[in-house]
Image (cartoon, rainbow, N blue to C red):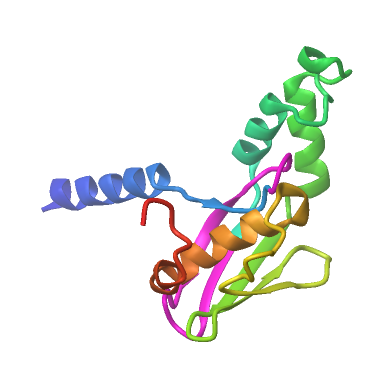
Amino acid sequence: MRISLLSMVVFTFAMSSAQAEDFPLASCAGWDGTLVSRTGTDSRAAVMEGNVNQANFQEYCERDPGYETVAHGGKLTVEQCVAMYLKENGKDTYRSTADCRKGTLSFVPPGGEPLRATFPLPEDADVSCSSGMPPLIKQFTMLCPKAARKFKMLQGE
């Protein structure tokens, strides 16, 4: 019994770390966060919470859209870049809530005003990277996949 219980714990831990999902934050050049929890999917009170960690900053600094690293003409190594962002933003947390029936989403960034969106978006809505809408659209599809399907927001459907 001990071996099977230990095996289940190890297997569960391995699965949960392997299935880490992004918390969509990046619109064009920024980093994504890591999803910590998601509850109430497809409900009137759907919630997802996330944070940022070393892996998020590692991906960002390797991609280096801000030309901060030596490889892209900047002054920092990738390791220095990661350390800098960990120090500046490593405690940031994020939260999005959705009312899937109403098609509303509210995203609360750290230290900022909530961003709100109502879906489906108007046909002439700005969904470019610079509008900030791509991560909000992705957050809504993660919290409200049934509504997203109904609004034809999921690719391939």
Query: Magenta span has 32?
Result: yes
For this orientation, the residue located farthest to the front is: 124
Residue 87 percent across, percent down from the top left:
81, 42
- Picture quarter containing residue 147? bottom left
Comparing 147 with 114, the one in front is 147
Query: Magenta span has 8?
Result: no
Q: Which quadrant is home to the C terminus?
A: bottom left
> Looking at the picture, does residue 79 appear above or below residue 31?
above
Residue 137 percent across, percent down from the top left:
58, 61
Q: How many marks?
A: 0
For this orientation, the residue located farthest to the right is: 75
Comparing 90 with 119, the one in front is 119
Rendered residue at 76%/13% (across/down): 71
Residue 152 percent across, percent down from the top left:
44, 64
Rendered residue at 53%/56% (across/down): 35
> Does residue 109 appear to the left or right of 19 in the view shown?
right
> Looking at the picture, does residue 98 appear above or below residue 143?
below
Residue 76 percent across, percent down from the top left:
84, 21
> Does residue 109 appear to the left or right of 118 in the view shown?
right
- Picture quarter containing residue 119? bottom right
> Does residue 154 appear to the left or right of 9 in the view shown?
right
> Looking at the picture, does residue 103 appear above or below residue 30?
below
Comparing 34 with 156, the one in front is 156
For this orientation, the residue located farthest to the left is: 1
Rendered residue at 44%/82% (across/down): 43
Magenta stretch? 27-49
Rendered residue at 48%/50% (across/down): 21
Comparing 44 with 78, the one in front is 44
> Looking at the picture, does residue 3 appear above or below residue 96?
above
